Image (spheres, rainbow, N blue to C red):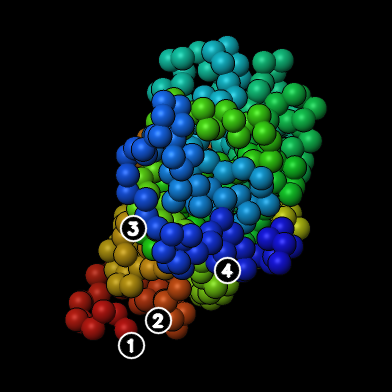
Amino acid sequence: MDPAAQRFGTRAVHAGQRPDPTTGAIMTPIFQTSTYVQDAVGSPRGGYDYARVGNPTRDALQANLAALENGRHGAAFSSGLAATEAIIKTVLDAGDHLICGADVYGGVDRMLRYVWVRFGVAFDFVDTTDLDRVRAAIRPETRLIHVETPSNPTMTITDIAGCAGIARAAGAVLSVDNTFATPFLQRPLDEGADIVMHSTTKFLNGHSDMIGGALLTNSDELAEGFRFQQRTTGAVPGPFDCWLVLRGTKTLHLRMPAHCSNARRVVDLLRGHAEVESVRYPGLEDHPQHELAKRQMRDFGSMVSFDLGSEERANRFAASTRLFQLAESLGGVESLVSIPSSMTHASVPEEKKKEIGLGPGLVRLSVGVEDGDDLVDDITQALAALRAGVRMPETGDGGLT
Ligand SMILES: Cc1ncc(COP(=O)(O)O)c(C=O)c1O
């Protein structure tokens, strides 16, 4: 069957992979090698010469991720931030300008403010939910628009096709961080984006056991630029980490529906709960970009943010959950809770946090694929502990009712 005609689940399991020709191993081997034998100078025996430049396990992952995003090219990096940095190094020169979504992952904010500013890259953080503001921020030297949708942790939705049109008209490139949605829920290249970026650490791997990043594109020129960055600046993933993501993507189409339906149950509980001030989830009809989310996404994901009004209450909630573990990161099969203002986004300046609505009482949940009843019970008891003003005593049964 023509791989291009295969449906998402089939691509997730097979794209980029075939049984190993030397052994018949059904799983792509972990090519744990730093170099490859050459028969003569410049004639590598198997087409590979050095593992920073290329590795068959990495190639399989890159092809697999590209197929899932409907892209022709993929490039894997050692982290999501390394992948983001590779975009900047490929697209921008000193003196160029970048428009960055206002509420992107805190690490991108820190990278721009503390690293790229020193190399003459100009940037503006813009509320990309408002296309007029994106248009107004364009300068003659704007070369890149980078957005995250849904955004972390404020859960805003940006119109990808709208931003792609603005970027095209300005002679700029649009990159979209698709980490929260994954290609199962949203495919930015189909909407006109030039680059999709992932922290593969999250849903693509899905099991919280590695750090990685990836860039996917249909542009030959950008793909060549990303390969140049891999071999020249060297932030490539090791083969075992590539293999772990490859194993993860085989079940992406099974995990995501379970993530989404558990998130919906948690949102239904939080919404209207007396202890909760507000809930941010693009699946809610009163979410400001709900209609756009419905158009652009297949479902609404499993990241949920809600406001408990104060840091003290947010901390108390996070200390009271038993299944939801307090930790950075997201997208694994297990449920996590975090307080973005003092964890993932601690480096974002206070005034900007206020501007984007990232208050100290904001709690972010990464809803996993455990039994939904147990997740609902856990949130219920943690909210009850908040009302009682005390930490619930440990019962020793893992919080299960
Ligand atoms: C949406 C998003 N993008 C990018 C990153 C950075 O990825 P990494 O931690 O793999 O460098 C993160 C990390 O939390 C993230 O949540």
The kind of residue on which mark 2 rests is Asp
The kind of residue on which mark 4 rests is His
Residue 374 numbered tag: 2
Q: Which residue is mark 3?
A: 209
Mark 3 vs 2, N-terminal side: 3
Mark 4 vs 1, N-terminal side: 4
Q: Secondary structure at mark 3?
A: loop
Q: Is residue 55 above or below residue 93?
A: below
Mark 4 vs 2, N-terminal side: 4
Within 10 angstroms of label 2, few (less than 14), some, or many (20 or more) residues? Answer: some
Residue 401 numbered tag: 1
Identify the residue at image location x=66%, y=29%. Answer: 221
- Which image quadrant is residue 144 in? top right
Mark 3 vs 1, N-terminal side: 3
- State the separation of the CA atoms marked 1 and 2: 7 Å
Q: Is residue 360 above or below residue 304?
A: above
Comparing labels 4 and 1, the label whose residue is closer to the camera: 4
Q: Is residue 380 above or below residue 305?
A: below
Q: Of residues 47 and 244, which is closer to you in this image?
A: 47
